[in-house]
Image (cartoon, helix red, strand yellow):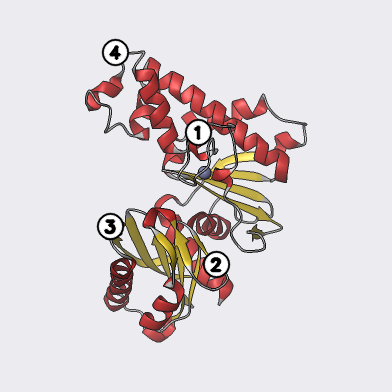
Amino acid sequence: MIYLGVDLGGTHIGIGLVDENGIIIQKEAPTLAHRPYQQVLETIVGACRDLIEESAVDQNDIRAIGVGIPGIETPSGMSHAKNLAWNGVPLRADMSRLLGKNTYIDNDAHAAALAEMGYGNLKGVSDAIMLTLGTGVGGAMIVNGKILSGYNHAGGELGHVTFVQGGIPCACGRRGCLEKYTAASALIRIAKEYALRHLNTCLYEKGEDLNDVTAKDVVDGVRNGDTACKQAFEDYCEYLSDGIVSFINMLNPQKICLGGGLSKAGDILFDKVREKCRERYFSPLHMETEIVPALLKNDAGILGAAMIAKQND
Ligand SMILES: [Zn+2]
């Protein structure tokens, strides 16, 4: 059976046809998130139709559609996504009607976790936590092989637990959320602060105002021994390890899986975070939790979205 998976992000839309072996064919389209919902919907539906036409797949073989969104769907079928300015849009009903297939919506971090459970580093793992370290921090808690999403299906927002009381203002309206200290954007902010004290840092090669500095620039700086980057990365890993150990103490997972852009930093990140977590563990039992990278990288969203459809249909 074939499922259509749609990974809807703030900047791009990934669409793929997925069978039991993985993605058969995929394509991308820009989200252009500032546009009204109706226009974004037209882009998604148009790209889905084009993909089906380009593939050799018989439309009748497509069982259902799954969509991972950077937000949540309420039980009444309304989608909410802050960075798309969606405050209750009928995405599920519209896509079902326009494409003629049952459509299922879930949070994008939940989709990434499902993908890792189906094809990646969480295969066969019953209890785990997924954290996606990107512009924000997405989360998923997996308990007894199922994603724990709460009574209204809105749970698992691990990036929005209070980390610093009265801390940095967050897009969610509160202050000091974990996301403000452990997202890739947090690493950039911390690095810019250190750059003001280390004027010889490589970060100024991207321009005096530091506006174009990326998380990858900071990680590259760490690899090259840049002092500002190394100090920023040290602080960042302290924050992330504090967050991770709190989640380990809460759920006692077998694995913590880190995805999102920053997880691509590889050993430089994982070695340091594992070392810092070892200093913080509550008991030897808690030390058994493995901290692993997400395996699927760019395909996770589409594969996870297809699994949303498979699990629900
Ligand atoms: Zn928040």
Distance from label 1 to label 4 (Cα)?
25 Å
Distance from label 3 to label 2 (Cα)?
24 Å
Instruction: Provide the residue designation for mark 3.
Output: 32
In the image, 210: left or right of 2?
left
**Front residue of this view, candidates 225 and 199:** 199
In the image, 49: left or right of 259?
left
Circle 3 — which element? loop
Instruction: Provide the residue designation for mark 1.
Output: 181
Q: Are marks 2 and 4 in contact (CB under 8 Å)?
A: no
Identify which amino acid the numbered label 2 is placed on: Thr
Q: Residue at x 44, y 78 (%)?
A: 93
Circle 4 — which element? loop
Q: Earlier in the sequence, mark 1 or mark 2?
A: 2
Mark 2 crowdedness (10 Å alpha carbons): few <14, some 14-19, many ≥20: some
Mark 4 crowdedness (10 Å alpha carbons): few <14, some 14-19, many ≥20: few
Mark 3 crowdedness (10 Å alpha carbons): few <14, some 14-19, many ≥20: some
Residue lying furthest bottom: 60
Instruction: Provide the residue designation for mark 4.
Output: 200
Q: Are marks 1 and 2 in contact (CB under 8 Å)?
A: no
Q: Residue at x 31, y 17 (%)?
A: 201
Q: In which quadrant of the rendered image does the C terminus lie? A: bottom right
Mark 1 crowdedness (10 Å alpha carbons): few <14, some 14-19, many ≥20: many
- In percent of width and height, residue 185 lies at 41, 36
Instruction: Tell me: residue 222, above or below residue 75.
Output: above
Distance from label 4 to label 3 (Cα)?
37 Å
Identify which amino acid the numbered label 4 is placed on: Asn
For the residues carrying marks 4 and 3, which lies nearer the camera in this image?
Answer: 3
